[in-house]
Image (cartoon, rainbow, N blue to C red):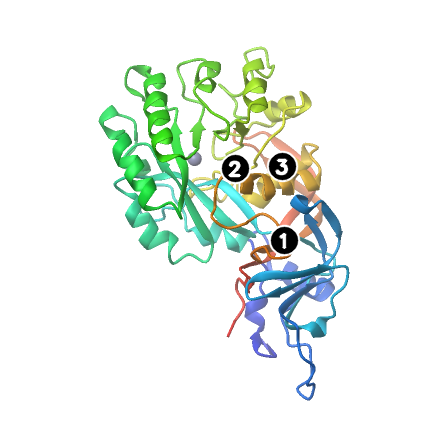
């Protein structure tokens, strides 16, 4: 391939496994998203920004922006957001004409302890390569297995990687991490969180069918104890609880998260298909509802029913891992496309993957917005029109008329895939 300035054409490949080379060539021709040095060598004009992103439609729910806006980035931070910034102001230019620019997406439920926890996948494959600049690993590691996750997976990743520490010491490196109550060691949990506050943002507990004696309330009690000691929120995976869901919800505090809210069985709907009043009360007092699509946890009928009853989601997450990354989940953009198809607005689905997840956990950095001064984590998407088949965790199909396709992303101003000097 021909070189374009200092950037090889290979650096311009769009993101996402679903985009073919032909689509890329077509996209590049029509939308011309490119990195280039726009000024001729004889120019001595001072360039104000390291990078400018021009021509896109910026959707930043945290700032209430949905408008054509250009972005100037310097030293990894957003230096200016304006209706128009000249290309000549940037040493690098990202041309996003005809595309959607958002704060870098945040996926609060993934499994990325690649090579150690059974189904986990490389965080960059499902993260920044898909426009998701921040992933939260939801419980793949526990107190005894977290150090390896930190050193060998999170540290070298191009994606920001955070963790919800599994309350079970081995985490999901064993087939049933709650097979023995001895696996839950509140002191070890608190010590591990305290030593890793920059990365561990909460605890993960899974209501599994294999909890000894079906005593899920005892598991919740120990989890609560550890969470209070560590001062972090809990994400509880529902679906395998033996107790009624309202009994689990009673043990949650404001700031905690219920994931797999819209699964087929034992979801937030009662047997009659109505949202439990206790779920509404929990949301009222600050408990967050999350999707966690996964291989078994998003049902289109349940989702349509719950959304139809006005239930408000805090986060849309993928629960992506090796067992579903080739379908039905694929990743966060496809999961967002499903909710777009089910009637949520584009602004609302972007909000559920940017500003609201950013507010759920303490990431130690202002994420989920492109306001001036914020870190320049940014994603560019194409909205591709045309029939696209969506499949839920149970194999139900819907045909969408459009879908979000990741095109480019940057973390702290550094474009993923680009040759940077
Ligand atoms: Zn999960």
Residue 119, horizontal then vertical, whole percent = 37, 41
Residue 379 found in image quarter: bottom right
Spatial separation of the CA atoms under disc 2 and disc 1: 18 Å
Residue reaching furthest to the top:
272
Q: Which residue has dot 2 on it?
A: 360
Circle 3 SS class: helix
Residue 224 lies left or right of residue 132; in this view the side is left
Q: Is residue 2 above or below residue 261?
A: below
Spatial separation of the CA atoms under disc 3 and disc 1: 25 Å
Nearest the camera: 177 or 70? 70
Residue 396, horizontal then vertical, whole percent = 58, 29
Label 3 neighbour load within 10 Å: few <14, some 14-19, many 20+: many
Which badge, 2 or 1, comes first in the chain's sequence?
2
* Mark sitting on residue 338: 3
Which badge, 3 or 1, comes first in the chain's sequence?
3
Label 1 neighbour load within 10 Å: few <14, some 14-19, many 20+: many
Residue 272 lies left or right of residue 341; in this view the side is left
Q: Which residue has dot 1 on it?
A: 370
Which badge, 2 or 3, comes first in the chain's sequence?
3
Residue 222 found in image quarter: top left
Spatial separation of the CA atoms under disc 2 and disc 3: 22 Å
Residue 50 lies left or right of residue 401; in this view the side is left
Circle 1 SS class: loop
* Mark sitting on residue 86: none
Q: Is mark 1 within 8 Å of ligand 1?
A: no
């Amino acid at each position: 391939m021909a070189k374009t300035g200092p950037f090889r054409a290979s650096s311009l490949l769009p993101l996402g496994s679903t985009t073919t080379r032909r689509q890329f060539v077509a996209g590049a021709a029509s939308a011309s998203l490119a990195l280039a040095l726009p000024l001729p060598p004889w120019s001595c004009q001072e360039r104000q920004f390291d990078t400018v992103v021009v021509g896109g439609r910026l959707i930043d729910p945290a700032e209430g922006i949905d408008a054509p806006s250009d972005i100037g980035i310097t030293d990894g931070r957003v230096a200016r957001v304006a209706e128009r910034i000249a290309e000549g102001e940037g040493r690098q230019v990202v041309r996003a004409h005809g595309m959607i620019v958002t704060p870098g997406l945040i996926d609060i439920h993934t499994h990325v302890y690649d090579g150690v926890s059974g189904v986990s996948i490389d965080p960059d494959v499902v993260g920044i390569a898909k426009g998701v600049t921040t992933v939260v690993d939801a419980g793949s590691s526990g107190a005894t297995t977290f150090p390896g996750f930190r050193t060998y997976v999170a540290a070298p990743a191009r994606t920001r990687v955070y963790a919800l520490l599994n309350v079970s010491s081995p985490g999901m490196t064993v087939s049933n991490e709650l097979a023995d109550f001895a696996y839950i060691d509140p002191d070890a949990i608190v010590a591990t969180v305290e030593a890793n506050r920059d990365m561990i943002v909460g605890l993960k507990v899974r209501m599994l069918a294999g909890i000894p004696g079906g005593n899920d309330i005892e598991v919740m009690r120990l989890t609560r104890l550890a969470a209070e000691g560590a001062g972090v929120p809990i994400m509880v995976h529902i679906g395998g609880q033996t107790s009624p869901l309202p009994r689990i919800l009673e043990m949650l505090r404001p700031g905690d998260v219920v994931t797999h809210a819209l699964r087929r069985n034992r979801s937030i709907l009662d047997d009659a298909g109505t949202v439990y009043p206790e779920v509404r009360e929990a949301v009222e007092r600050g408990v967050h509802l999350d999707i966690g699509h996964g291989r078994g946890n998003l049902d289109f009928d349940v989702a349509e029913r719950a959304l139809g009853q006005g239930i408000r989601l805090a986060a849309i997450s993928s629960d992506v891992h090796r067992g579903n990354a080739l379908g039905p989940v694929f990743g966060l953009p496809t999961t967002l496309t499903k909710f777009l198809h089910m009637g949520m607005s584009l602004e609302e689905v972007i909000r559920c993957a940017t500003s609201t997840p950013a507010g759920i956990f303490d990431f130690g950095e202002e994420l989920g917005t492109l306001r001036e001064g914020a870190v320049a984590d940014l994603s560019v998407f194409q909205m591709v029109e045309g029939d696209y088949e969506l499949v839920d965790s149970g194999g139900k199909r819907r045909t969408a008329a459009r879908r979000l396709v990741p095109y480019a992303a940057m973390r702290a101003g550094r474009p993923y895939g680009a040759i940077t000097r």
